[in-house]
Amino acid sequence: MAILNLLFEHRDVEGIGNIDVWEANGGYEGVRKAAALEPQVIVDEIKTSGLRGRGGAGFPTWIKWNGLPKNYDAPHYVLCNADEGEPGTFKDRELILKIPHLLIEGMILAGFATYSKVGYVYIRGEYVEPAWQLRKAIDQAYAKGYLGKNILGTGRDFDIYIHMGAGSYECGEESALMSSLMGERGNPRLKFPHAPLPTVAGVWQAPTLINNVETYCAAAWIIKHSGEEYAKYGTEKSKGTKIMSVSGHVARTGNYEIEMGTPLMELLNMAGGVKDGVLKAVIPGGSSVQIMRPEQCEKINLDYESCGANGTLLGSGGFMVFNDKTDIVQLMRRTSQFYMHESCGKCTPCREGTRWLFKILDRIASGNGQKGDVELLLDVCSQIDGRSYCGLGDAAAWPIVGAIKAFRSEFDYWIEHKRSPIGNTFVPPVVEAVNPVLALTSV
Amino acid sequence: MIQNGINTLADSYITHPVAQPEDKMQFSEEAVAELEEIISHYPERKAACLPALWIAQREYGGHLTPAAIREVATRLGTSQTEVEGVATFYTMYNLRPRGRHHLEVCTCLTCAVMGAYDVVHALEHALDISIGETTADGEFTLSEAECLNYCGNATVVQVGDHYFPDISPSNCLNLVEELRKSEKYTPALLADSLVKIQTPGASLKGGGSFKAEEI
Ligand SMILES: Cc1cc2nc3c(=O)[nH]c(=O)nc-3n(C[C@H](O)[C@H](O)[C@H](O)COP(=O)(O)O)c2cc1C
Ligand code: SF4
Ligand code: FES
C-alpha cells in the first residue's frame, strides 16, 4: 500500500484544466456512460464501491444518494461542500485548481442519480484562484453540452452555479452551509432525529444532497471505471484512496493520494521524513482530531478503523507533522484561538467555552498558568463536548483533551516553570477578542 | 477583524430601519445587471445576499458603509437588519475602510509552527503598525488570518484575491515593496473577482486581478 493516483491520475498533465485536454485523457466518459443508465444503477455502483464521505465524518455516500425522492416532481438540489476550512487540509483546493472537470463530472452524475436539476458549489471566499478555474471549466462544459438543457440528448437537465462564501469555517458544517447558501448568517440548523435529514428537507426545504469535493471526484472515477474496481483498493471498511494534505516539519509537503490503510509512518517517509529534528507528534486528520505521539504513530494505518481504534480520526486528511522543537502548549493555544474565532455563537457551551479554553491556554502559554489549570481545561472541555449544537464545539474540545492526554508533562512544566519546556519559539500578538479595548478600536 | 458575536461596530452602526433621505443608490447599471443575473440562480431573491454584498463592497470602493447595506436590503427586498447580520457574520466583508492592500497573514497551526509570528513581527516593524491597524498613508492593513488552507507552503499571506506562499521574515519586505507598486490585489478587485466568478460566461471576460488562463 502506498501512493495510488486514481483521482490525481491526470493531475500533472499539461493544460488538464482545459476541456479538450481533459476529454483527450478520457474525460466525460463517465458522464456519457451514465447518460444511458437508470439513476438507480448509478446509486448501486456507488454502493458497490463502498465509498464514504471525504468531508470528515466518513458517512457512506450511497445512502445519501439513495435518500432523495426518486422523481422530478419537485426541485432537488445537489450541493458541493468546497468550504475547506479545516486547518491542515488543502486537498479540495488542488482538486478544483488542477482538475476542475472531475468535480463537474461527479456533480452531473449526482444530479442524474438523485433526480436533481440544479447544483451549487459552495466555495470559501478565499479560494479565488481555484474558483476562477472552476468558472472556466463550467463555462466550457456548458459549451460542450455536458451542462444545461437536455444533456447529451438524454432529456435530462443540470445546471451548476458557484456560490462564494465570505470567510467562515462554520459554513463548512452542512446545515450552516445551507443557511449561508440561502443568504443568511452561517448558523447551523437542528439535525436528525430532531429535524428531517437534508435528503428529505434541506436547502429551501427541498430534498438536498451534500457531499465534499473529494467525494464527488471519487464518484466520477467510480462511474467511469466501476464500483468493483474501486473496492479492490483499501481495507474492508475503508475502500479506495484518500488524499492526505501533508504539512509542517516534513521535507516534501503537499497532497498525497494514498491507498486507504497505508501505514502512517509510510506516508511520513514518502514525504521525505521529519525536517530539522526528530518526530514529536502528528495530527493525522486536521486540527479537530487528537494529536498522536511517535509511538502511537507507529501503530496507526491511515483508514477510518485504525485511526478510530487508536484514539484519533482520519477526519479530512489534514496531516500535520511536528518536530521536537514544537511547543505543544503553544500549539494548543493557537488551536483554541481558531475555534474561538470560528464559533458561530449560536449555542452557549461553544460560544463561551471556546473563549474559556483560549483564555486558560493563553495564560498558561504566557507564563501565568495557575495550579489546577489543566483540570480546569478538562472540565471546560467536558462541558463543551457533546453539549454543543453542532460539531464545531466537539471539535474544539477533542484536540485539547487529546493533547493533555499525550503531553500532560508539558502543560505541567509550563505552569510550574512559567516557560516553555523546549524554549519559547514564538511570541503571539495580543488577541482582540479577549481584549475589549482592542476589540473596539481595530476593526 | 470582526469577532463573531461581538458587535465591534456599535459606534458606527446604528440601525436605520428604512432608507435614509440622503441615501443615493450607487450600483452602476452593470452591477445591477450582474445582481439580477446572480439572483436568477436561486429560487428566492434573498439568497443572493452574499454575492450582493460582494457587489456592494466593490461599488462602494472596498468596504460596506451603512448606506451600502441599506442598498442591498432594498434591492433584495429584505430587511436591513438581516443584511447587517450577514455582513457582520463573515470576516471577509469590510465594515471599515482598509488599506489599499490588505495583508492577511495566516498564523494558524502549521504556519504558526513554521514561523508565521516572525513574519507578523517583521511586517509590523517594516510598516510601523500593529496587527489590525492601517498605515497612516492608507497603503496597508495588517491582519492575522485563520488557516488559509494552503498549509504546505507556510507561511501564507493573502492579499486581495491572491495567495502569496512561502513568506518568511526575509522575503516579506520584498512583498511589501512589490505591492506598493502594484495596482492589483486590492479589496475592490477581490470583490470584483468574487462577483465575476458567480456569473456564467465570465471566464471569457476575466475580472479581479487576473483571468482564469493566467493562474
Ligand atoms: C465545524 C464543521 C466544519 C466542517 N467543515 C467542512 C468543510 O470545510 N468541508 C467539508 O467537506 N466538510 C466539512 N464538514 C463536514 C460536513 O458537515 C459534512 O459532513 C460533509 O460535507 C459531508 O460530505 P461527505 O459525506 O462527502 O463527507 C464540517 C463539519 C463541521 C462540524
Ligand atoms: S457548536 Fe459552536 S459553531 Fe456550532 S452552533 Fe454552537 S456556537 Fe455555533
Ligand atoms: S495554517 Fe496557514 S495556511 Fe493552513
Image (cartoon, rainbow, N blue to C red):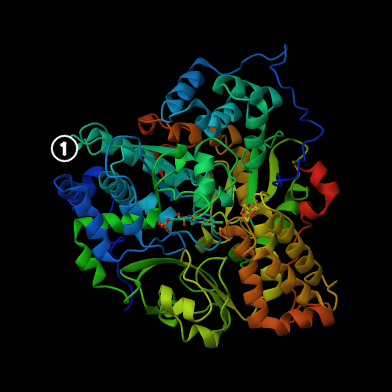
Residue at 76% x, 53% y: name it. Answer: B125
Q: Which residue is mark 1?
A: A154
Q: Position of residue A87 (x, y in %)?
A: 56, 61
- Is B139 above or below relative to A173? above
Q: Position of residue A37 (x, y in %)?
A: 16, 48
Look at the image and tell me in which quarter the C terminus of chain A lies: top right
Residue at 53% x, 55% y: name it. Answer: A85
- Chain identity of mark 1: A
Residue at 55% x, 23% y: name it. Answer: B76
Look at the image and tell me in which quarter the N terminus of chain A lies: bottom left
Q: Amino acid at mark 1?
A: Thr
In front here: A275 or A39? Answer: A39
Ligand 1 within 8 Å of disc 1? The answer is no
In front here: A295 or B165? Answer: A295
In the image, A245: left or right of A383?
A: left
Residue B69: which quarter of the image? top right
In the structure shown, which secondary structural element does the residue marked by tag 1 occupy?
loop
